[in-house]
Image (tube, rainbow, N blue to C red):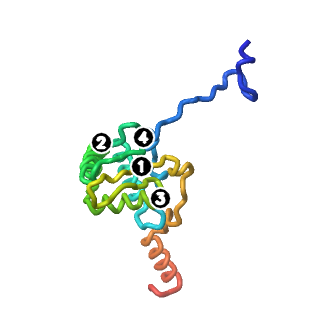
Amino acid sequence: MFKRNLAPGRELGQVESRYELKPHQVFRRAREWQFAAGAIGHRKWKVIQARLKILARALATFDRSGDCLAIYPATRTILRCIRELETNHAADTGEKARTWSLRTLFVYLDLLNKGGIETKTGCAFNRKPRIRSLHPEALLSVPATHKHARRESCTQRIYKRTSDFSSSGWFG
């Protein structure tokens, strides 16, 4: 009786979930490595990925529908929300809170835009509002490898050189 109701190729007990996360839930559950598209080519890429994650989470909270397609707040409102998220995160983890200035916010909004995660429409420097939208499909589904992910330590390299000199007779 149960076998008739199963889709072809499925066995008894295998069930596929039909629930899909809404875009705001995708951004709240995202990991740092998923924001690598905006951080590629920068020196402090891990810090950039963590900040992009916090910025995307803050932007996702401003959308009332949950689709992340109509985000209207001003940059000062976004900045206030991010500072609050950073202080809460620092209190939970015991780390020092990162500081966000208005310039820093614009830099990271631009990185989100270049990574394809966020787009802007509407008028800038005008009375009409700037409309931002987030695209969860632009988040990476596989961790990106970075060319500067593993570096040799500077002190380790110097130690190897001095050991080479001592064996060749330079140091006594």
Give the number of the mark in front: 1 or 2: 1
What is the spatial separation of the Cα atoms under label 1 and label 4, in whole angstroms? 11 Å
Q: How many marks?
A: 4
**C-alpha span from label 2 to label 4:** 22 Å
What residue is pinned by disc 3? 115
> In what element is the residue under mark 3?
loop
- Reading the image, the residue beneath label 2 is 92
From the viewer's perspective, is the residue at label 2 or at label 3 nearer? 3
Amino acid type of disc 1? Ser
Counting residues from the N terminus, which is met first, the one under dot 2 or under dot 3? 2
Q: Are marks 1 and 4 in contact (CB under 8 Å)?
A: no
- Above or below, 161 against 147 in this view is below
- Count neighbours of disc 1 (C-alpha within 10 A) and say few if under 14, some if 14 to 19, many if 20 or more: many
The quadrant of the image that shows the N terminus is top right
User: Mark 4 vs mark 3: which is more N-terminal?
Assistant: 4
Q: Which residue is at a point 67% across and 22% down the rendered structure image?
A: 13
Residue 38 in view, yes or no: yes
Identity of the amino acid at label 3?
Gly
- Nearer to us of marks 1 and 3 is 1
Mark number for residue 133? 1
Sequence order check, earlier mark of 1 and 3: 3
Which of marks 4 and 1 precedes in the sequence? Answer: 4
- The percent coordinates of residue 10 (x first, y second) are 72, 27
To which residue does mark 4 refer?
A: 24
SS type, badge 1: strand
Mark 4 secondary-structure assignment: helix
